[in-house]
Amino acid sequence: MTIVQKFEVAGTGYNVNTLKVTSNIGDFNSASTFDAVVKNPNNKYDDVLTIGKEVIIYADKDTDPPTTKIFTGLIESAIRKGVEQDSILTIKGRDYSKLLMDVIVEPEIYTDQEVSVTVKDLMTKYISDLTVVNVAVTTVTLERISFNNISVYDAIKKLAEKANFYFYVDTDKDLHFSEKESNPSGLTLDNTNVINSTFSETSREIYNNVWVYGDRILSGWTNSFTGDGVGSVFTLDYKPHNTKNFVDDVLQKGGIFEMMALAPTPGIHYLVNYDEQQIIYVETDTENNIPANGADILINYDRSTPIIKYGVNRESERIYGKKDKVIVDLNIKDPREAKQIVLQTLEEYSSSRIQGTVNIKGIVSTIAGNTIKINLPESSINNQTYQILSVSYNFNSATIQNEKVVSITVSKKLLDLTDTLKDMLIQLKQLQAQNQTSDDVISRLETDQIDQKFRVKEWKVIKSEVENSFILGGAVNGILGSPQVAANGSQLELGSSSFTSVIVTSGTEASGGATWPTAWGTWGQLPEYT
């Protein structure tokens, strides 16, 4: 008995010296990679096994050719070593989650929407090559969530965190978005198929006191006073923004302290001293704006307050001691979003983490994110269900013959340097995008020579007739002396031109008398983006 694998690129099979396929899950997401070494005599495959080609890998036991897909993805890199007959080609790539990682979500805000609806909307807008058949409905409706120029992958991960879901792209190029630990693999690991196993537990990544800091926001505040006819300076509780000042229900006109002329400007009733939190009523030779004795003074203004939420798991604190975590994300513009992050973090990190690695005899077809049952009494594990964190397939002559191809890691993931670096990269992207909003107007210049689709809210098209203009390299108008393109039947001359420009914007009618291309539909209505 032996393990059989097939390595296929763009529909053609190739023999490989070694092949490794790894399916990994983070806390809320899963992705697969491959690494293959192919003999490449005289650089035979340099122009065949190239970046961007689709790779499908099959594996079965005692079935030749194998029919079970364990990987579908794209080549991302090709490394050539050696010369002539000793040349080898190492190719690497990722599954189709690569598409999610490579595309950026423009500033978007979603309100009062169930999570899976948002996931599907993002996929429809940005990823046209993947289906969403297995995006499951959640029980979570988010009051507000925003995305500022992060990848589609990170945006869906953010949604998965809110719903306690995880996601991956399967071998049929369909996005799965499912509740964590809800998809059983149907496999049981025990003494009949386990070669060896190692399990470890740690309290290193426990957090039971969590602070979340978001951006600062403006919120309304009011201070009221009673005039005494003498005092002109009134101190507020906070530094004021957008001040509205009423004296006996009459709206006053204000200015900025130390930014007005040396002498008070006529018609200005008060000045705002922002740094000192003061409202200063002014008096001139002709005007006395100091509130009279007994006057009702009402000052409405906005104060700048930070979004801060804090949560604690007392039971975890009693067992493990106090473990603090501070999350700073200036993209958080709503206190409700900060609260959701606190609750999610406490749920995920308040208990110790267990992780095990099991080496299996034979071949199994499963992916990270599914659950698996393990029954190893000698390791004090009796029919317990774990989530699969990673599945690693190592194909070479030795492992294939000995049926020692598969290694599975289960339970909660212990964070490593790669996770830390990725979090730092995400935080950097968030910092760079923190001042961008969905209301920003983006100007773009895009050129192409084929049909193209654009996601825009408004558009303007300028259509110009070529007529008898000379176009360098043009099939017709690039031929000097050709009478067939001249408007008056004469020969086309270099530099002659007669353009009729027509400008059309979204929602308007044509102008200029030119004919709108039939394929574009009616004037002002470009084909809908899908």
Image: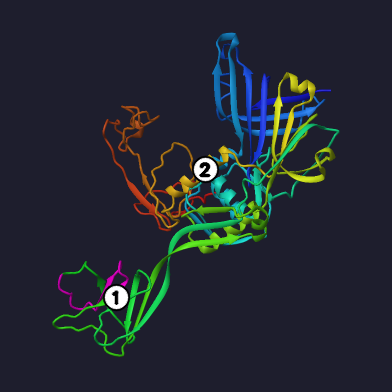
Residue 384 seen anywhere in this rendered image of the structure: yes
Locate residue 335 relative to residue 222 in the image: left or right: right
Q: What main secondary structure does the magenta stretch of the protein show?
A: loop
The region drawn magenta spans: 262-278
Report the amino acid beneath label 1.
Answer: Ile
Question: Magenta stretch: residue 263 in it?
Answer: yes
Question: Magenta stretch: residue 269 in it?
Answer: yes
Near-viewer residue (75 or 35): 35
Q: For the residue labelled by badge 2, is the local secondary structure a helix, a strand or a loop?
A: loop
* Disc on the earlier residue, 2 or 1: 2
Q: Residue at x 71, y 33 (%)?
A: 70
Residue closest to the far right: 192
Q: Residue at x 75, y 23 (%)?
A: 399
Vertically, is 101 above or below 41?
A: below
Query: How busy is the neighbourhood of tag 2: few (under 14 within 10 Å), some, or many (20 plus)?
Result: some
Report the amino acid beneath label 2.
Answer: Val
Locate residue 485 relative to residue 393 in the image: left or right: left
Number of marks present in the image shown = 2
Whole-angstrom CA distance, mark 2 to mark 1, is: 50 Å
Locate residue 231 relative to residue 89 in the image: left or right: left
Near-viewer residue (408 or 524): 408
Near-viewer residue (168 or 512): 168
Residue 134 seen anywhere in this rendered image of the structure: no
Residue 314 horizontal/vertical position (percent): 64, 60
**Label for residue 232?**
none
Vertically, is 493 above or below 342?
A: above
Locate residue 180 relative to residue 82 in the image: left or right: right
Q: Nearer the viewer, mark 2 or mark 1?
A: 1
Residue indicated by mark 2: 103
Residue indicated by mark 1: 279
